[in-house]
Image (cartoon, helix red, strand yellow):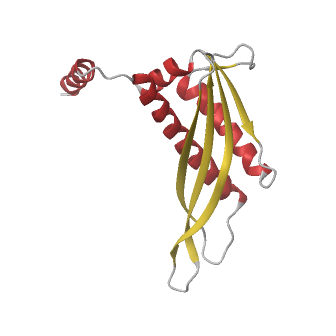
Amino acid sequence: MKQIIFTFLVVFLTACGYIPSSHMAGKTLGENVFLQINISKQDPQNSVYISDVLRESMLNKLGRSITSENEADSVIIVTMKDLKFTPMIYDKNGYVINYKAELYLEFKLRYKDGKEELVNTKGSYYFDINPNSVISDQARFEAIKNASRQAFDEFVSIVAIRGYR
């Protein structure tokens, strides 16, 4: 039964011309990418978290080499525009037990031909905390990491769509 389902999926995905978005985005960006993450003066610690996640995602999800600006096929400059933690759920005593982290990133793309474009993305992540406590550093890091990944995935999708045209 598993072989039948697997065979059906393979035939269906190849028949409809499915191309992974990471492949299309990679085609648009080129093989070598220069990635610059601007560190926020107001929030340097969180900017470092975001920087680590974006570099990891560039290597793992897109499989692109991060090179110097002179050798790059495209340049990506990332700026953190905003990071918010919003209370979402309260317990019966009025204490916050769930937050939503929202991260807004701006990606400035510069291609080898000199063309530039701006892509704004948003990532969000919901997480629980103990009643009557503050957000721990670990919970904050996890929230920023997951919101960064979601914002990067949105960026990849947008670039992939542009590469498909």
Q: Nearer the viewer, residue 20 or 82?
A: 82
Q: Give the x, y percent position of residue 66.
A: 68, 21
Residue pictured at 49% horizontal, 40% vertical: 154
Residue pictured at 73% horizontal, 46% vertical: 47
Q: Is residue 129 above or below residue 104?
A: below
Q: Nearer the viewer, residue 110 or 82?
A: 110
Which quadrant is home to the N terminus? top left
110 sits left or right of 45 in the view: left
> Which residue ends up furthest to the right in the rendered image?
41
Q: Is residue 73 above or below residue 22?
A: above
Q: How many marks?
A: 0
Q: Give the x, y percent position of residue 76.
A: 65, 30
Q: Where is residue 105, by image quadrant?
A: top right
Residue pictured at 59% horizontal, 15% vertical: 31
Q: Is residue 70 above or below residue 132?
A: above
Q: Nearer the viewer, residue 81 or 133?
A: 81
20 sits left or right of 152 in the view: left
Which quadrant is home to the C terminus? top left
Residue pictured at 52% horizontal, 44% vertical: 150
Q: Nearer the viewer, residue 162 or 83?
A: 162
Q: Give the x, y percent position of residue 92.
A: 50, 84
